[in-house]
Amino acid sequence: MDCGTLTASNPMANQVKNSPASMPCVFRKPPVMSRKKPAVLISVSRLNISQNCQLIAEFKSEPVKRTFERIGQTVSLTAFLELNLRSMAKYDVIVIGSGPGGYVAAIRASQLGMKVGVVEKAELGGICLNWGCIPTKALLKSAQVFEYLKHAKDYGIEVKDAKADFAAVVKRSREVAAGMSKGIQFLFKKNKIEHIAGTGKLKKGGKVEVTAADGKKEDHEAKHIILATGARSRELPALKIDGKKIIGYREAMVLPEQPKKMIVVGSGAIGVEFAYFYNTLGTEVTIVEFMPRIVPVEDEEVSKQLEKSFKKAGITIHTNAEVTKVDTAGKGCVATVKTKDGEVKLEADIVLSAVGVATNLEGIGLEEVGVKTDKGKVIVDDFYKTNVSGVYAIGDIVKGPALAHVASAEGITCVEAIAGLKPHPINYNNIPGCTYCSPEIASVGYTEEAAKKAGYEIKVGKFPFTASGKAKAAGAPDGFVKVIFDAKYGEWLGAHFIGANVTEMIAEVVAARNLETTGHEIIKSIHPHPTMSEAVMEAAAAAYGEVIHL
């Protein structure tokens, strides 16, 4: 009887009959246990980890000593299976971090037939899903509903005594995040991805040292290791986060009670989203921005429109301003702010630091294995290879914008390159950016200023939502669509939206630019009426002097 032979008397036969042995290793059941049955041969070299664990447990409980015949060498079955289990623990890919870069990379790798493990010390889904993108959208939706109620009379609806229950709003946000994290658990199970709980650290020789919550360390081996450790709130010297009076975005999502006054330092996406949320719920909000305008990475006209809308909503804004000191000794906070007109003192209950993020590169073994970094970013090629063979990096810790959808795209590109599929490098000039305050902001490609600096002769078209029937009917006339084309070839260089639901509209531009669509092709693409999306067609027509509704 050869090694591949299985008998019906073997309870594991049905599970492994289609898994050929990789080496001539067999278990022979002793005659004392099966006097009237033929000897049972079990191929175990290809059993999966759970099957090996099952066998180990079964045979450890048996009173009779069992032996394993291996090319003339006899060893205890338990010892052999434990050795086999360790060999089976080798992965094709280990991902450190389960955020939108890490978990997407893991799933794509599994789809491509790789054995995958993901190291994660906290909740599956990372910061974005648990403490960023998703729960903040839940908070913002609550704010939007409350805003509707406050203005219900404008729509012919009478609503009396509407009030926001801050604790309930926070609770709903956490429930949404928890549900999404369970969704990632389901996807891991579906795709046979192993969650390795703990903190991961690179070691030489293709190994990852994982430290569990109890301090126990264990090495895991993989052919390819992907770093996806993400980022955290950046701290300024004058703005040290204490988690109580000076907080980051994480604390801002779960405050025990709503502050009466809040200072938001920084007006990027995080800053303006929280400013909108707290202001709508009734907190007195002041924004302090170091740059000359809020949302400084956006097109200048978008910045001006948001500032106008925010001031109309009662938010105080200081630009060209810097917080130099925060006194937290008293009941609340007193922030010293240096402005172009001199120094001012601002009082508040809470100061929110929203001045960007810092990459999580500490303690993950970069120095030990020789992975090169520059200015807080891991240096990678177009397919996210580092200078160390078998080590890759994606997401916030590499070049490009620190956005969830960018990390996901990088994870897929990285894994497909590992699998030999030859994917195209990511075009970082066609990455959409979205900000979910009210009005929303969405943009992609060149700003008008950047296009001019790049040497393009441009055509610019703009269509205000005040001229949109759908926007007027929805009671959301603030904002506009702005498009920029290359005058010579018609190439769509950029688009900048501000208004209600514009984050749902920007994908049209991304897809069109990816297909190298021209301005005239957009004009001739019939958009549905009445919609806010037809403003894109109207703006394109405005760029070429063909606009109808202006």
Image: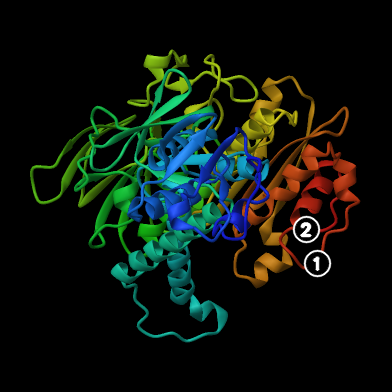
x and y percentages locating residue 129 in the rendered image = 46, 52
Instruction: Give me the residue at 55% from left, 40% from top.
Output: 26
Residue 385 sits above or below residue 490 on the image: above
Secondary structure under tag 2 reads: helix
x and y percentages locating residue 453 in the rendered image = 67, 21
Instruction: Give me the residue at 84% from left, 51% from top.
Output: 547
Q: Amino acid at mark 1?
A: His
Q: Is residue 229 visible?
A: no
Residue 320, image quadrant: top left
Residue at the spot of label 1: 529
Quarter the N terminus occupies: top right
Residue at the spot of label 2: 534
* Colour scheme shown: rainbow
Residue 337, image quadrant: top left
Among the two numbered marks 2 and 1 on one chain, the one whose residue lies closer to the N terminus: 1
x and y percentages locating residue 137 in the rendered image = 48, 58
